[in-house]
């Protein structure tokens, strides 16, 4: 009877082992689906003067970590990330979407791949660059006329050009020279250039998304659309063209992030409409600076935090759903092995019993 008892012990031990193994697999599946929702381990920011904190306190052209009120740095602190280790900001003041695309491709691929969240602020300089280039020659031709009217035109830098444009369009004395400039900028070839700018922006955004996915990244991607700093000014062909380009960029971005081909994990932060009625409150327009002020950056950060947490929670829910779908297959495999093991143990027991009885006989 000693051998028979040993066999029974082996049988029950096998049952316990297989049961433990089955529970362990189930526990692993469950824990994989219960990852903390809304957490960010790595974040990447790309873009222009908005995401680099231009005109904010402590702004430094080659150190995006300096302006603490920049929305990007607010996000860095909010998610407890560390600069250049788990938080990377490759933004550069003056960059258009083609520059941002180049910056993305120049970044370390593992940095792109490992990011949970990628934020891209671009499009504004696409518009401003083509408008400023178009207006430059026209303003140069009228510069002496502006001076006679007591209006100073400074075309020496990006900031001075923006300030000059804002001051001219809001100055009633500049009516006649502006009419000549507007007439020149209303020509069909100029309008075609404006239309091509939007098409190039669209192509760049699509390439950004494709490249991010090519690296193997599963990041949630957020595009900040540019707002219209000229919407408070009186309407004319140039202002209307700027508004039209910015509106089209906003619409194109939404179309892309809502599309079947590019929409997976991509989102639009609609600053175009969000800032429309709050330009005076959230920008420095009073001082002829079109960039967001401290309050504007805080609002952008709050928008992003809400949408990032929502997107990551949604991602976690999708992962859990996928794990649930895969679980029956995993459990079936476990149960098959469990059944085979039990059958083998049962066969051994039966064989041992028969052999033992034959010995007794």
Image (spheres, rainbow, N blue to C red):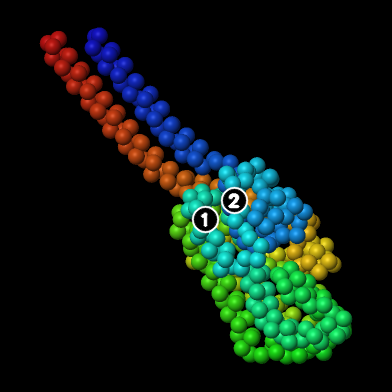
Query: According to the image, label 2 marks what residue?
Result: 88
Front-most of residues 91 and 74: 91
Residue 178 figure quarter = bottom right
Q: Position of residue 360 (x, y in %)?
A: 14, 10
Front-most of residues 251 and 82: 82
Query: According to the image, label 1 marks what residue?
Result: 107
| 185 vs 57: above or below | below
Q: Position of residue 30 (x, y in %)?
A: 49, 38
Q: Earlier in the sequence, mark 2 or mark 1?
A: 2
Q: Indicate the secondary structure of the residue bearing disc 2.
A: strand
Q: Looking at the image, which residue is at 32% across and 37% down?
A: 336
| 24 sits to left or right of 354 | right
Q: Quadrant of the image for the N terminus?
A: top left
Q: Position of residue 334 (x, y in %)?
A: 36, 36
| 44 sits to left or right of 29 | right
Q: Looking at the image, which residue is at 50% across and 53% down?
A: 108
Q: Quadrant of the image for the C terminus?
A: top left
| 183 vs 256: above or below | below
Calculate the distance from the C-alpha at mark 2 to the C-alpha at mark 1: 10 Å
């Amino acid at each position: 009877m000693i051998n028979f008892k040993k066999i029974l012990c082996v049988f029950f031990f096998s049952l316990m082992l297989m049961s433990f193994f089955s529970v362990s697999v189930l526990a692993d599946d469950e824990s994989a689906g219960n990852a903390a929702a809304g957490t960010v381990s790595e974040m990447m920011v790309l873009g222009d003067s908005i995401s680099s904190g231009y005109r904010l306190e402590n702004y430094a052209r080659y150190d995006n970590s300096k302006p603490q009120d920049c929305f990007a740095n607010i996000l860095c602190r909010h998610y407890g990330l560390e600069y250049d280790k788990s938080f990377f900001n490759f933004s550069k003041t003056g960059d258009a979407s083609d520059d941002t695309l180049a910056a993305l491709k120049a970044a370390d691929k593992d940095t792109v791949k490992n990011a949970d969240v990628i934020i891209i602020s671009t499009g504004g300089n696409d518009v401003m660059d083509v408008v400023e280039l178009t207006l430059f020659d026209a303003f140069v031709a009228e510069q002496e006329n502006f001076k006679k009217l007591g209006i100073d035109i400074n075309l020496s830098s990006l900031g001075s050009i923006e300030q000059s444009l804002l001051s001219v369009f809001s100055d009633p004395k500049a009516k006649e020279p502006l009419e000549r400039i507007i007439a020149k900028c209303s020509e069909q070839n100029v309008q075609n250039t404006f239309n091509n700018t939007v098409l190039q922006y669209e192509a760049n955004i699509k390439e950004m998304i494709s490249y991010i996915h090519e690296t193997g990244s599963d990041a949630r991607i957020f595009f900040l659309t540019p707002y219209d700093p000229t919407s408070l000014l009186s309407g004319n062909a140039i202002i209307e063209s700027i508004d039209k380009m910015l509106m089209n960029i906003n619409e194109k971005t939404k179309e892309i992030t809502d599309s079947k081909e590019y929409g997976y994990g991509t989102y639009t932060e609609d600053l175009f409409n969000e800032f429309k009625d709050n330009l005076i409150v959230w920008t420095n327009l009073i001082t002829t600076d079109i960039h967001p002020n401290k309050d504007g950056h805080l609002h952008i950060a709050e928008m992003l935090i809400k949408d990032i947490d929502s997107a990551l929670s949604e991602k976690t829910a999708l992962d859990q759903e996928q794990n649930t779908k895969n679980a029956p297959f995993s459990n079936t495999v476990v149960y098959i092995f469990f059944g085979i093991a039990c059958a083998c143990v049962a066969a051994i027991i039966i064989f041992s019993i028969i052999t033992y009885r034959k010995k007794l006989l």
